[in-house]
Amino acid sequence: MSATKRPSGSARPLASAAAGLTGNVVGDMLQRLFHSTSATGRALRLAGLTAGVTGSYVGYMAQRMFLGVEGRDTKRRATHAKTGHRIRDELQLLRGPVMKVGQALSLHTDLVPEEMLAELTKLQMEAPGMHPSLALAQFRASVGRSPEQVFKRFDAEPFAAASLGQVHRAVMRDGTCAAVKIQYPGIRAAIESDFRWIRNVTLPAQASGHLPKAALDEMESQIVAETDYVREADHIEFFRTSLKPLDFVVVPDVYRDCSTDRVLTMSVVAGQHLDAFLAKHPSQRLRDIVGSRLLELFYFQVLILKVLHADPHWGNYLFNDDGTIGLVDFGCVKQLGSEFIGRLRKSFLYPGRTDSPDFRRIVQEQFGSPGKKLSSVSQRAVADFAERFYRKVYPPDLKDADRAFDFSDPGFLRDFLRAAGKLARAKGSTTEYIFLVRAEIGLYTTLHRLKARVHTSAIVRRLLAESRKEDGSS
């Protein structure tokens, strides 16, 4: 591994985001926002959403018995679309972790109905922005100057808004185009509120051991860390340097003089989001190139950098006609320890039998606790995972090393989620895998949408050899 400085976690103080706000419009906006981010307000909205969604499907089930086959299909599709629209509207208003749940659901093209998916996908980039007065006040309170004093031009209306903040176009004093990310006020309190709600509704899963408290702690700490934009700036600079060996990846520059812990100013990265890219009907060759590069980018991070860009939704990747890939939004970055990667290496492309003592030892090292033997149920779940998914997608035999896997087949996604579900039910997953699996789901879903054909084993085999060489291991 290169000697590149790894991301740090520094932060800067922030004055009150509401300082200097005047006028009834802004006051109404603040009141609405603070209500939606209070513990009681958010819990009530989530409870209302749950009841509303349940009611929609109960109504559909009551009506379907009086409809013919065609009428049932029409009503079912309309119910999916209406429900998706309602979920999207509520999660956009609430933002924070619950909106991230919606973004995660939008990746599950194999599970979520098409009509609902069309609505949830809008969560990737189309959350409603703050009122311009509030955005300007947020910037001024954090930077100490107004955008007009900092930039040659600043667009008060955002061009992208997501779960924790929104992004504005700007022009630097020297004429350079920039993207300015401004954090929503009260978002840290919203995260605490959401996780209190999540912990309460998942008590049965926690009690059974299927959702360890440590896993929830890990998720909450990572999302809280995403609110520190100084930390994110460190991540961007780390990846900008460390990904240079992959000349097809473009990472933005950070303008530190115009950034704080809640305002982040970056250079603009060219490219189109996945839907726009696919709408141009790229050739199979281009889709294969992009797919191969996405897979290489994933395993280069895991095996070489041991640091993973772990927010895989489609809004964070930009695609170009020359096959280059823009990578944006570095809030969620997961450090992977050397011991963890060492254990992963032993299982990648494992050529032996999955019922052998050697494989059971590898599984025990990966998923077991020190001094505690992994149950036979968990052992079988991991072996099933290897057989049903990994050996199909990544053939371990050298004679199959140059064989391309066709990701257009939806069966592999079903196999992945089915096997992962069995593993979770067997309590065979660990907190270390939470963000790795999250990024992996995003990768496979994107490859499926691209209908890419990728030489998976050849890419992984090459990077495995490179990582062992860098670490001096066999």
Image (cartoon, rainbow, N blue to C red):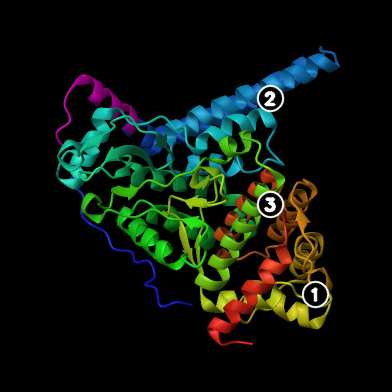
In the image: residue 155, left or right of residue 447? left
In the image: residue 357, left or right of residue 114? right
Q: Secondary structure at mark 2?
A: helix
In the image: residue 75, left or right of residue 335? right
Which residue is pictured at 58% across the width and 55% down the height? 439
| Spot occupied by residue 198 in the image (x, y as percentages of width and height) | 51, 46
Residues shaded magenta: 18-33
| Spot occupied by residue 55 in the image (x, y as percentages of width and height) | 63, 23
Identify residue type, mark 1: Leu
Looking at this view, name the residue that lies furthest to the front: 322
* Residue under pointer 1: 398
Numbered tag placed on residue 59 in the rendering: none
- 3D distance between C-alphas at marks 3 and 2: 40 Å
* Residue under pointer 2: 57
- Where on the picture, by quarter, is residue 373? bottom right
Which residue is pictured at 57% across the width and 59% down the height? 434
Q: Secondary structure at mark 1?
A: helix
Identify residue type, mark 3: Asp
Residue 342 appears in the figure: no
* First in sequence: mark 2 vs mark 1: 2
- Where on the picture, by quarter, is residue 436? bottom right
- Where on the picture, by quarter, is residue 180? top left
* First in sequence: mark 3 vs mark 2: 2
* Residue under pointer 3: 288
Question: Circle 1: is it few (<14), some (14-19), or many (20+) Cα within 10 Å?
Answer: few
